[in-house]
Structure formats: structure tokens, C-alpha cells
Amino acid sequence: MGQILLETLNELRGLSKELTTDQDHLLNLSGLLQTEIERLLALQICEIQYDFQQVSLIQSRKAKFIQRIFQEFVQNSLKYAACQKMDIRLMQQQDTITLQISDDGKGFDLNAEFHGIGIANMKKRAALIGAELDLHTSPGQGSRLQLQIHLNDH
């Protein structure tokens, strides 16, 4: 688990550098997320099932924000929810890419006052790239995130 956090911090430093440049090339979101999944599989912490359809290349800024949202959800699932299984789907319909992640963890009450900064960070990142983020969870029922990324925005 510590290795994931260390890698995430290093990637965040890289993202900070990227955001201060004018560089906005296209990236393969599937490849970025595949790399994340391979890291998780190597740790053998939980069972992961995934299905990635072919999706369009997207702006690097969007791809990096999506990657961070993905990392935040996965880290929370492993650290706080003690999940044993995750299901990850990436698909595209017309100009919208959808990322769905679900876990079989403890879940939590979304209406409770305090959740930490993870959920707020995911929502802020989604808003910054014009994506729609839906999080569904309840105690004992696991968590499910759906992120819809519109290719024609931002």
C-alpha cells in the first residue's frame, strides 16, 4: 500500500509540472488506466476484473485528471473499505467516454458530515475537465463511481 502512495506522490509532482506547461497532447486513457491496474494486480491485494473498450485519445490534461480520480477511488477502496473485489469498465458512446469502478467494500453513508478530502478532490477534478461524477455507496453495500467524460468540452 505504501508503494502506491509513493508512486502517486511522484505522479502528482509530474502532474504539477505538466500543468505549468502549454503542452496538451493526446494520450491513451486506456493505457494509463491499464498501467494502474497492472500495479494493483502485482500487489495482489484484491481481485480485479476489468473490461476496456477502444476509446478515443484524449487531451493529456483530461487524461491525467481521470487517472487521479481513478487512483483516489481505488486507494479509498483498498485503504478504508477493505474491498476484496473491484470491477472496472471503460467504454465510449459517440463523444462520451464512461469510466465505471465498483468495489465490494464496506461502503459508507454519503450523507454523513465528514468524508475527508478524497471525494471533494474527485469532484473538483471532474468539474475542472467538464466531466460528470456520480458516486453511489451505502454501509455494507460497497461503492460505485461513474465518470462521464465529454470529449468536446474543455
Image (spheres, helix red, strand yellow):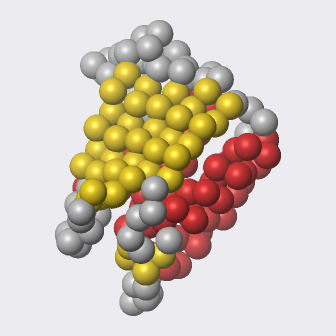
x, y percent for residue 154: 23, 72
Would you identify the image quadrant in which residue 145 lies? Answer: top left
Q: Nearer the viewer, residue 123 or 35?
A: 35
Q: On screen, 48 above or below 122? A: above
The residue shown at (47%, 32%) is 102
- Residue 57: give x, y in percent of width and height: 42, 74
Closer-to-camera residue (140/97): 97
Count all numbered tags in the image, as a single digit.
Answer: 0
Q: Say which residue appears at 27% left-offset and 57% top-offset.
A: 93
Q: In this view, does 144 lie above or below 29?
A: above
Residue at the limit of the structure toward the bottom, as seen here: 22
Q: Residue 64, relative to residue 91: is it above or below?
A: below
Q: Where residue 146 sits: x, y (%)?
A: 34, 41
Q: Which residue is drawn at 60% across and 37% down?
A: 49
Whether residue 123 is visible: no
Q: In this view, does 153 lie to the left or right of 65?
A: left
Q: In this view, does 108 lie to the left or right of 31?
A: left
> Residue 28: where, in percent of width, then height?
50, 71
Q: Quadrant of the N terminus?
A: top right
Name above or below for residue 30 compared with residue 90.
Answer: below
Instruction: Point out the residue furthest to the left here.
Output: 153
Residue 7 appears in the picture as rendered? yes
